[in-house]
């Protein structure tokens, strides 16, 4: 999403109470900097800089801001999604109507309410991100369909079999190794992307966001 404030990722098992993923949409006049997503694999990490080969094939330098935060993701299952959970679901409109999930992030309880809402996302063309509370979860013909609620609205999203489902997990700087997959919400700056948060893949699990 390029017209919204992007995720703030903050972590550690004991420090997970620091706020998380996509912030709610903001009016243009409220934005202080253009926001970008960096998706790719680490080429090199040193101190306050990450060199990343993006999914588009470009190699870029990402500057890490003071007090930047780091986390990873861990595998979860569709059956882990329970009514009352707060989730972030990237989805695409389905041919038969409604939305079909591209990925699901189950937030830890301390992050409930982070970036609540539904807004444009850039995982794929025409995709959206919905951060909402699970109102119901029922098995459908093509997988599981969840009903989620946000700001008094409801949305049904089908989760086809095989959809990545993850949750936030801890990470250390030792995980920032060449080849590790990252998702970085950053600010666009004259010197290149400036990041306050980094989400890194580890143990074979990559950020599907």
Image: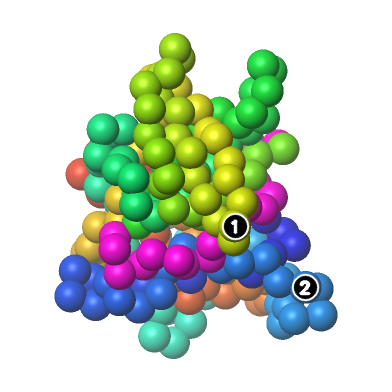
- The residue pinned by badge 1 equals 152
> Would you say 40 lies left or right of 129 here?
left
Residue at horizontal 48 percent and vertical 39 percent from the top? 147
Q: CA distance from mark 1 to mark 2?
A: 20 Å
> Is residue 201 in the magenta section?
no
Classify 134 as above or below 188: above
Classify 52 as above or below 18: above
Could you tell me if residue 67 is visible in this image?
yes
Q: Residue furthest bottom?
A: 66
Task: State which quadrant residue 160 falls in.
Answer: top left
Task: State which quadrant residue 19 falls in.
Answer: bottom left
Q: Residue furthest left?
A: 14
Q: What secondary structure prevails in the magenta region?
A: loop
**In the foreground, 141 or 11:** 141
- The residue pinned by badge 2 equals 27
Circle 1 SS class: loop
Q: Residues within 10 Å of mark 1 (few under 14, many from 20)?
A: few
Q: What colouring method underlies this structural image?
A: rainbow
What residue range appears in magenta?
108-125
> Would you say 100 lies left or right of 27 here?
left
**In the foreground, 134 or 102:** 134
Could you tell me if residue 205 is visible in this image?
no
Q: Earlier in the sequence, mark 1 or mark 2?
A: 2
> Is residue 119 in the magenta section?
yes
Q: Residues within 10 Å of mark 2 (few under 14, many from 20)?
A: few
Classify 188 as above or below 149: below
Q: Residue furthest top?
A: 141
The image position of residue 9, as x and y in percent, is: 42, 68
Residue at horizontal 37 percent and vertical 22 percent from the top? 139
Q: Residue furthest front?
A: 152
């Amino acid at each position: 999403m390029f017209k919204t404030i992007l995720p703030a990722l903050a972590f550690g098992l004991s420090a997970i109470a620091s706020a998380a993923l996509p912030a709610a949409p903001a009016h243009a006049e409220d934005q202080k900097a253009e926001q970008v997503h960096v998706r790719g694999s680490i080429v090199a990490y040193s101190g306050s800089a990450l060199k990343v080969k993006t999914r588009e094939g470009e190699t870029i330098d990402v500057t890490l801001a003071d007090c930047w935060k780091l986390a990873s993701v861990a595998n979860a299952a569709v059956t882990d999604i329970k009514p009352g959970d707060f989730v972030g679901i990237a989805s695409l409109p389905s041919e038969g109507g409604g939305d079909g999930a591209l990925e699901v992030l189950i937030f830890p309880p301390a992050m409930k309410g982070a970036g609540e809402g539904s807004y444009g996302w850039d995982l794929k063309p025409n995709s959206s991100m919905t951060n909402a509370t699970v109102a119901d979860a029922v098995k459908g013909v093509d997988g599981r369909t969840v009903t989620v609620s946000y700001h008094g609205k409801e949305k049904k999203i089908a989760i086809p079999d095989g959809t990545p489902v993850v949750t936030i997990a801890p990470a250390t700087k030792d995980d920032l190794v060449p080849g590790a997959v990252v998702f970085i919400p950053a600010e666009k700056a004259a010197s290149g992307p400036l990041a306050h948060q980094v989400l890194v893949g580890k143990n074979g699990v990559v950020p599907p966001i």
